[in-house]
Image (spheres, rainbow, N blue to C red):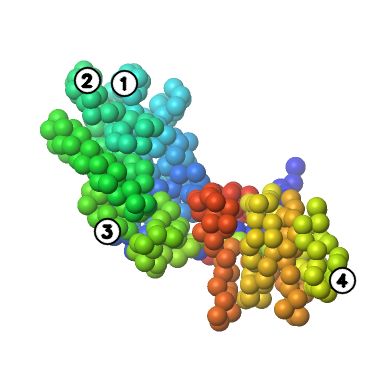
Amino acid sequence: MSAYTVTPSRCHIDLAALRRNFSRLGDPASIMPVIKSDAYGHGLLPVARALDQAGARRFAVGTVSEGAALREAGLGQGIVPLLGAVSPEDWQAAVALDLTPLLADFEDIEKAAACCPADRPLRVAVKCETGMSRLGFSAEDLPALLESLRRFPRITPVLALSHLSCADMPEEDAYTQAQIEHFAAMCAVLREAFPGIARSLGNSPAALGLPATRYEACRPGLALYGGNSFANTAREALGADLEWVMSVSAPVLRVRRLRAGQSVSYGRSFTAPRDTTVAVVAAGYATGFARGLSNRIDLLINGRRVPQVGRVCMGMVMADVSALPDVRTGDTAWILGGPAAPGQRPVTAQEMADELGTIPYEILCLMGSTNPRVYL
């Protein structure tokens, strides 16, 4: 069957901006870029290759399968699948491909022991639970954890990691500090048994504003892709120089006139208050433009912001271009990013997220996974 696409819209990924963001986050030797979930919708392999060129020495992925894809592409960095190995096949692949599987409970130790290679130690990461309450060993588990690991000397912990739950919320600084102290105490115990074990705690907001959490392997995610974890907080300036890596464009399909009182799209949610020129653009909720944004967000056309009007459809959105008399069929509309005229600014994933009451991670993952990607 011939290859096909479901939309003429395009997701543009600026790999140079990605590399610049990476360089802003500190010494490459101390950074473990998070490229899980297909690099937040930006494309696992192109992103990994760009970061490899920029000096990345480690990667955090979501699944063993993502780690396998990096190995098959010839990337030799240390790779930690953050979800762990979830099946016997995952464990076998993690060992065969020299990934660093996650130990998050006592069953994981038994599974790791069952597939230890005969010719080398099995290097693993130990997940510490410090306040996220998802995966990991608690401080109370440490004596039993160390005893279990002594039974299997070929299992070698090389990384201890935990995750900060609200480092992007200045009002939760006390909770974040408690997590930091909890992790430090757990690592002190682990380092007595495994002196060379590296530590990984800091995430994007920590990379921007909590230098004490960087340790040997800071794990930024959103910041790599240009998102400011401190947006809309008193610390917003800490991420002001980050650049969004993703932009999304779509062609104008038709330009038409609405008479005063005439409506457009489903549900008649927009009725023209006066004679209005509308551009119909080839993007919609099937390509990550949330229906909940109907009549609430702008698009960028010919460098200028114009209001989206009417109900967002599966593959079409409409914009009021009455103020732009030169818009024509075939012009490019920018859903995210794009070249803005002087005095104008593009729409960002943060702006969309604010309108929807969500986070930019969701916008990027959806836009990146539903639009064909092109790389700059």
Residue type at mark 1 is Phe
Q: Earlier in the sequence, mark 3 or mark 1?
A: 3
Q: CA distance from mark 2 to mark 1?
A: 9 Å
Q: Earlier in the sequence, mark 4 or mark 3?
A: 3
Q: CA distance from mark 3 to mark 1?
A: 34 Å
Q: CA distance from mark 1 to mark 4?
A: 69 Å
Q: Which residue is at 54% across, 55% downward?
A: 353
Judged by depth in the image, the label closer to the viewer, 1 or 4, is: 4
**Marks 3 and 1 close (CB-CB < 8 Å):** no
Q: Position of residue 168 (x, y in %)?
A: 37, 52
Q: Position of residue 333 (x, y in %)?
A: 67, 68
Q: Earlier in the sequence, mark 2 or mark 1?
A: 1
- Figure check: 60 above or below 192: below
Q: Position of residue 5 (x, y in %)?
A: 71, 51
Which residue was labeled with disc 3? 27
Which residue was labeled with disc 4? 259
